[in-house]
Amino acid sequence: MPQDYRLAPQFAARLLGLTLMGAGLAIVVATVVAVGFAAQPWVVSITVGLALALILFVIWTLRSGTWVVRLTDDGYKVQFVRGAGVKQARWADVADAVTTEVAGSPCVVLRLKNGGSTTIPVEFLAADRDEFVRAVLAQLKLHGKAR
């Protein structure tokens, strides 16, 4: 059974805030263009509708249980993390796991046998840091990788 780790609330709020700011900016630009160039008022209406749709989509995505890290019996997958490196791998391909800090943020780094790695900032996850590390180590131990 997969173990899913969702986005931490503070990062979800930041993402929603950026979406609201971008939508507001798009509405202001559409209004200025419509007034400044005597464009049709439907330009603003369409922009407001698209902005509202985007906001609702982001809220739905954040509330629907979208995961950031998924641990399965076969391997792991990471999404929505820029700079994570290798986004998915099988446990058989993992050489080891270490905890470290990257840019002042605590991370779990899964080092792969082929030289690649996956860096997961644990602050990004809506889970206890130690619980996540234990889950990763349990998977590695299950596949004969833990020391």
Image (cartoon, grey):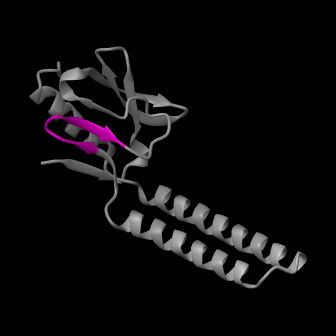
Q: Quadrant of the C terminus?
A: top left
Q: Is residue 132 above or below residue 92?
A: below
Indicate the quadrant where residue 61 lies: bottom left
Residue 132 in picture, x, y percent from top left: 27, 42
Residue 74 in picture, x, y percent from top left: 16, 34
Q: Residue furthest right?
A: 36
Residue 23 in picture, x, y percent from top left: 64, 69
Q: Residue furthest bottom?
A: 41
For the point 52% across and 74% down, the residue is: 53
Quick one: 35 or 131, which is closer to the camera? 35
From the viewer's perspective, tell me whether residue 122 is left or right of residue 50: left
For the point 33% across and 43% down, the residue is: 129
For the point 70% across and 68% down, the residue is: 26
Would residue 74 be counted in the magenta stretch? yes
Main SS of residues in magenta: strand
Q: Is residue 38 above or below residue 111?
A: below
Would residue 50 be counted in the magenta stretch? no
Q: Is residue 122 above or below residue 139?
A: below
Quick one: 129 or 68, which is closer to the camera? 68
From the viewer's perspective, tell me whether residue 70 is left or right of residue 86: left
Residue 106 in picture, x, y percent from top left: 43, 36
Magenta segment, which residues?
70-78
